[in-house]
Image (spheres, helix red, strand yellow):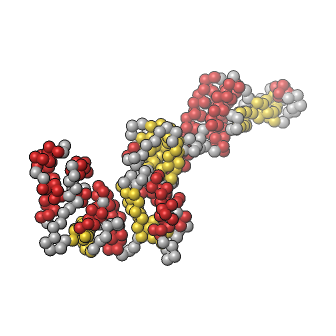
């Protein structure tokens, strides 16, 4: 019975995140409770726990008295009974007796085991929460353990369960069980009294940590990342500043022939990253944020929180970017809504690239039109509705609405 009990308790030494001293304290507390229930007091008991192998020893210390003088059997023992434990005992000495665990009874032992399990699980949850609560924004590396429809379970180096939701994954992310995954700790939340660590690969902090890992000058404090904006998996803009005139912040972040940024781009599934030299000169920052487009002039409307940007006709589609990502991210980076206008000379016959309407017309509709060779607004306007209906998957009402949007551009 005693051996069986020791084996059953030895499993608790395997729990994660709990240090030896804490585990010993919890084990001792549980067994002292067991002792108090049986003997009324645990003052004269020693509980020795070995967390390495799960061994447990309980000793009772009692004063040796003469026959017939025992007042408290828990704290006193007759000389006759003491000499059965050890022949050399004398009256007035302290007799040490090892208590057989089996003497507590099977029911008491099982109850103690359940109490211990409950306390250790609670402790483990507390330690897990403490381990991650202050790690928000840190990168962690783990292994994919389980995949569900809306999230994945990742195990860290210590076997802790972390959650990577689908919404926090880059659209082109594809992982299978056993794959190694890097992500940033987004937050730690309590769910039914259990701590839940949520990871993210789409947060700006993930990109920031990747830059810190690849660019020593950032960790050394020579370069500061002022702001990051992202459309995960598509495009990102990173504004950087150097406190040392001898250090080119953009060149340092990109690396020789792109050596530093290539690893980051691969990790982010080929997300295009624009590294921009930060400046407090707002017109210049707006100009840089719209790169690679060449800006002619800028009007800032402070009170309205918007900016009018004028560009040559051939630069407008570059400023807007594929799917409108470039202008959208530039606006987020500088904190203004950006409206672009093309410069035209008097009487010039100007056409507009369809990509410039990405903010107003769905991408799949634009793709339908491009698939039949219509790349500009005038191409579409010049084709009659019947032909557009027959050559695309678009309905007549949709085509009429598209033409209104395109025509409005020339009516401005």
Residue at point 61%, 43% (across, down): 18
Which image quarter holds the C terminus? bottom left
Is residue 331 visible in the rendered structure shown here? Answer: no
In terms of image quadrants, where is residue 357? bottom left
Numbered disc total: 0
- 135 above or below 145? below
User: Is 397 positioned to the left or the right of 35 in the image?
Assistant: left
Of residues 411 and 373, the one nearer the viewer is 373
Which image quarter holds the N terminus? top right
User: Is 151 positioned to the left or the right of 335 in the image?
Assistant: right
Of residues 245 and 191, the one nearer the viewer is 245
- 122 above or below 236? above
Q: Position of residue 228 (x, y in %)?
A: 40, 61
In terms of image quadrants, where is residue 317? bottom left
Residue at point 47%, 57% (across, down): 262
Q: Position of residue 27 (x, y in %)?
A: 64, 37
Q: Position of residue 316 (x, y in %)?
A: 26, 65
Of residues 301 and 109, the one nearer the viewer is 301
| Extreme residue toward the bottom, this view | 245
Is residue 299 visible in the rendered structure shown here? Answer: yes
Residue at point 50%, 67% (across, down): 252
Q: Position of residue 159 (x, y in %)?
A: 56, 41
Of residues 218 and 50, the one nearer the viewer is 218
| Extreme residue toward the right, this view | 88
């Amino acid at each position: 019975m005693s051996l069986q009990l020791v084996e059953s308790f030895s499993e608790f030494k395997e729990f994660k995140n709990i240090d030896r001293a804490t585990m010993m304290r919890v084990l001792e507390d549980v067994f002292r409770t067991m002792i108090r229930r049986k003997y009324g007091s645990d003052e004269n008991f020693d509980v020795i726990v070995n967390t390495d192998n799960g061994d447990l020893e309980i000793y009772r210390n009692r004063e040796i008295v003469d026959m017939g003088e025992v007042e408290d059997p828990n704290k006193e023992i007759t000389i006759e009974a003491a000499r059965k434990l050890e022949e050399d005992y004398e009256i007035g000495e302290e007799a040490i007796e090892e208590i057989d665990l089996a003497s507590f009874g099977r029911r008491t032992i099982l109850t103690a085991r359940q109490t211990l399990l409950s306390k250790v699980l609670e402790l483990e949850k507390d330690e897990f929460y403490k381990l991650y609560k202050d790690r928000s924004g840190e990168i962690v590396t783990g292994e994919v353990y389980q995949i569900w429809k809306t999230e994945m379970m990742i195990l860290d180096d210590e076997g802790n369960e972390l959650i990577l939701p689908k919404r926090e994954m880059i659209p082109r992310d594809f992982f299978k069980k056993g794959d190694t995954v890097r992500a940033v700790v987004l937050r730690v939340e309590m769910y039914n009294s259990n701590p839940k660590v949520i990871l993210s690969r789409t947060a700006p902090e993930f990109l920031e940590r990747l830059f810190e890992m690849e660019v020593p000058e950032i960790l050394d404090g020579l370069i500061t990342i002022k702001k990051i904006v992202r459309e995960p998996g598509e495009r990102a803009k990173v504004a950087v500043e150097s406190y040392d005139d001898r250090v080119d912040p953009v060149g340092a972040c990109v690396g020789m022939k792109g050596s530093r940024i290539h690893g980051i781009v691969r990790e982010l599934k080929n997300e295009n990253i624009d590294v921009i030299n930060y400046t407090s000169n707002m017109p210049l920052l707006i100009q840089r944020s719209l790169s690679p487009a060449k800006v002619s002039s800028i009007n800032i409307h402070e009170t309205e929180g918007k900016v009018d940007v004028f560009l040559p006709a051939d630069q407008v589609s570059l400023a807007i970017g594929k799917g409108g990502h470039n202008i959208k991210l530039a606006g987020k980076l500088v904190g203004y809504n950006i409206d672009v206008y093309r410069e035209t000379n008097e009487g010039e016959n100007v056409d507009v690239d369809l990509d410039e309407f990405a903010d107003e017309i769905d991408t799949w509709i634009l793709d339908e039109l491009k698939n039949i060779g219509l790349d500009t607004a005038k191409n579409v306007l010049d084709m009659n509705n019947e032909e557009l209906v027959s050559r695309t998957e678009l309905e007549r009402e949709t085509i009429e609405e598209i033409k209104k949007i395109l025509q409005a551009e020339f009516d401005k």
